[in-house]
């Protein structure tokens, strides 16, 4: 970030090293009661990694089961529980909190020139709520299982399923409070704790996306909480809310669920877009083309994202006129996404490109996100959606956005900010190999699923017609390559904590404000209060 750092007051702490966190004076008790936003971010990294591991194991078993059409690896009931476990863990325990809870926690105060978040104790409480609710969810999924799918559609989730539906829903309900508190903390911090001179149009684009994401989390999460609570009330006390035999309306649940869950897509993808907007200027040595357009488009995605939930319900029996409006609004979403993609692309023009690992992940994101976005327009088209809904086409589209987008940029952010967070560099050659494995493995895993969906293979089926086996074998083989792309960074990043080359304060030569302090940053981030005079990434 282009700034002039003017000393205000005395240095508050000498720069430290990541290894000082492991000294005896920084024992486990100091971690569990810390109010340092950076250490809380590390706590999230650890717990999110555990959640991702569980979700990935479930995904691996699903692909193993689909290797043959007979469904001879797990039972039909076991398969239902596997894809429910995978969806619930990945969506609510990993993808939604992934970038905001980790890199948002670590870097939002630093990018604002602040000492910490506005409410440090509330920040720690948010992590405890996440751990408690997440442990509750995992226990319910592992001990007894749930077979409703991660969407909990009624009437199956209210009448017919005899699995741990209520405990799982209550765990997700609890996790939602962590999301709300984190969003509140981010919003107040952005409004009240910016450094002198840091006006709205001098904010880093990552801050813009975190702020827009926080608004979505604050406004949408209570709707999901209410929907899940109503499901629990109906299931426990047999109150007619969604059950038509009791005077309820099952479509009401879908409206409530998707009113949250489509904006939740932008909870996952907007922070990833913010990371791309930080990486590209750093490795092209140019500020993002059209800064204001990219910044404002984040709010366009957040606002319009609340108005398109009905495109998930084209075949549910809702009014055809409502479906037409939802279809048009869904196409509008593409405009704001296109603004970002075109402006990122123009940033490369006449740039001095340095092709390091973070930029590989950013390029991977752009390619995969564009594929996912374009195929989303197929699903927003009424006649095509009638054929493609509930097929593997939907699975492929969703994963191109969520995994190809959010997860690839979670790893991109990890590689970009790892030197700042730890003070150590990772080995570049295996890092580039991991980025290429992820891109290749992802496409080999999920592109065949577009073909399967176009051919008519329904999703969530335990066994399938043998005519689809070749495409499923390709998909399962791709999942193996994809797994290598995930495991490799886990190995060399841990290795780098002890053996990695010392990073220094700014190994990428970036102008972002976070790179103007030591690596890792001291307790209160800066030795003196920075004064901001220019937009980020400018001279």
Image: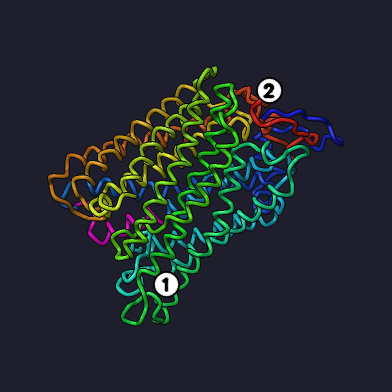
Quick check: 166 above or below 292?
Answer: below
Residue under the image location 48 percent in, 48 percent down: 266
Residue at image mark 2? 539
Query: According to the image, what is the colour scheme of the structure?
Result: rainbow
Classify residue 159 as left or right of residue 529: left
Quick check: 426 above or below 269?
Answer: above
Is the C-beta separation of discs 1 and 2 under 8 Å? Answer: no
Residue 494 appears anywhere in the view: no
Tell which tag, 1 or 2, sits nearer the viewer.
2
Task: Where is residue 37? Give x, y as percent.
Answer: 67, 46
Task: Where is residue 10? Give x, y as percent.
Answer: 86, 35
Query: Mark 1: which secondary structure?
Result: helix
Query: Mark 2: which secondary structure?
Result: loop
Label 2 crowd (10 A; few <14 / some 14-19 / many >=20): few
Task: Where is residue 225? Give x, y as percent.
Answer: 50, 66
Residue 231 numbered tag: 1
Q: Earlier in the sequence, mark 1 or mark 2?
A: 1
Span highlighted in magenta in the image: 72-88
Classify residue 459 as left or right of residue 37: left
Task: Where is residue 357? Give x, y as percent.
Answer: 49, 26
Residue under the image location 58 percent in, 52 percent down: 214
Q: In the rendered image, which quarter contains the N terminus?
A: top right
Residue 170 appears anywhere in the view: yes
Q: CA distance from mark 1 to mark 2?
A: 55 Å
Give 231 or 291, whichever is nearer the viewer.
Answer: 291
Residue under the image location 23 percent in, 41 percent down: 451
Quick check: 368 above or below 210?
Answer: above
Magenta highlight on residue 386: no
Magenta highlight on residue 86: yes
């Amino acid at each position: 970030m282009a700034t002039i750092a003017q000393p205000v007051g005395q240095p508050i702490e000498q720069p430290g090293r990541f290894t000082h966190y492991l000294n005896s004076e920084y024992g486990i008790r100091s971690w569990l009661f810390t109010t340092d936003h950076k250490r809380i971010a590390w706590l999230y990294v650890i717990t999110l990694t555990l959640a991702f591991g569980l979700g990935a194991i479930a995904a691996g078993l699903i692909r193993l089961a689909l290797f043959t059409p007979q469904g001879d690896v797990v039972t039909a009931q076991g398969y239902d529980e596997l894809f429910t476990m995978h969806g619930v863990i990945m969506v609510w325990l990993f993808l939604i909190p992934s970038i905001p809870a980790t890199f948002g926690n670590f870097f939002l105060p630093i990018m604002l020139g602040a000492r910490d978040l506005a409410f440090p104790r509330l920040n720690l409480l948010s992590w405890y709520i996440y751990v408690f609710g997440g442990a509750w969810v995992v226990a319910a999924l592992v001990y007894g299982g749930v077979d409703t799918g991660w969407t909990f559609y009624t009437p199956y989730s209210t009448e017919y399923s005899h699995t741990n539906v209520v405990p799982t829903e209550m765990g997700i309900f609890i996790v939602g409070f962590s999301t709300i508190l984190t969003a509140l903390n981010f919003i107040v911090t952005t409004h009240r704790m910016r450094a002198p001179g840091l006006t709205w149009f001098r904010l880093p684009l990552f801050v813009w996306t975190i702020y827009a994401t926080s608004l979505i989390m604050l406004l949408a999460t209570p709707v999901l909480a209410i929907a899940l609570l109503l499901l629990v009330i109906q299931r426990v006390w047999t109150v007619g809310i969604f059950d038509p035999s009791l005077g309820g309306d099952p479509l009401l649940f879908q409206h409530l669920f998707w009113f949250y869950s489509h904006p939740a897509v932008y909870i996952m993808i907007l922070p990833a877009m913010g990371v791309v907007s930080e990486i590209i200027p750093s490795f092209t040595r140019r500020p993002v083309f059209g800064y204001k357009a990219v910044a404002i488009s984040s709010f366009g995605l957040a606002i319009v994202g609340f108005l398109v939930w009905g495109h998930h319900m084209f075949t549910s029996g809702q009014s055809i006129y409502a479906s037409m409006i939802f279809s048009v609004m869904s196409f509008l979403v593409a405009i704001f996404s296109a603004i970002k993609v075109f402006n990122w692309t123009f940033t490369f023009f006449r740039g001095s490109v340095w092709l390091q690992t973070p930029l590989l992940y950013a390029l991977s994101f752009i390619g995969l996100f564009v594929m996912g976005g374009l195929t989303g327009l197929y699903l927003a088209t009424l006649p095509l959606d009638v054929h493609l809904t509930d097929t593997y086409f939907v699975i492929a589209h969703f994963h191109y956005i969520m995994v190809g987008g959010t997860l690839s940029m979670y790893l991109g952010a990890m590689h970009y900010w790892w030197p700042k967070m730890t003070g150590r560099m990772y080995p570049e050659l295996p890092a580039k190999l991991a980025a290429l494995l992820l891109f290749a493995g992802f496409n080999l895993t999920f592109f065949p699923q577009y073909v399967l969906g176009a051919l008519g293979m329904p999703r969530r089926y335990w066994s399938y017609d043998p005519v689809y086996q070749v495409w499923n074998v390709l998909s399962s083989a791709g999942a193996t390559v994809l797994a290598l792309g995930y495991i490799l960074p886990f190995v060399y990043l841990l290795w780098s904590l002890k053996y990695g080359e010392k990073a220094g304060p700014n190994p990428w030569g970036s102008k972002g404000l976070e790179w103007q302090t030591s690596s890792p940053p001291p307790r209160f981030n800066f030795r003196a209060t920075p004064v901001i005079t220019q937009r980020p990434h400018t001279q």
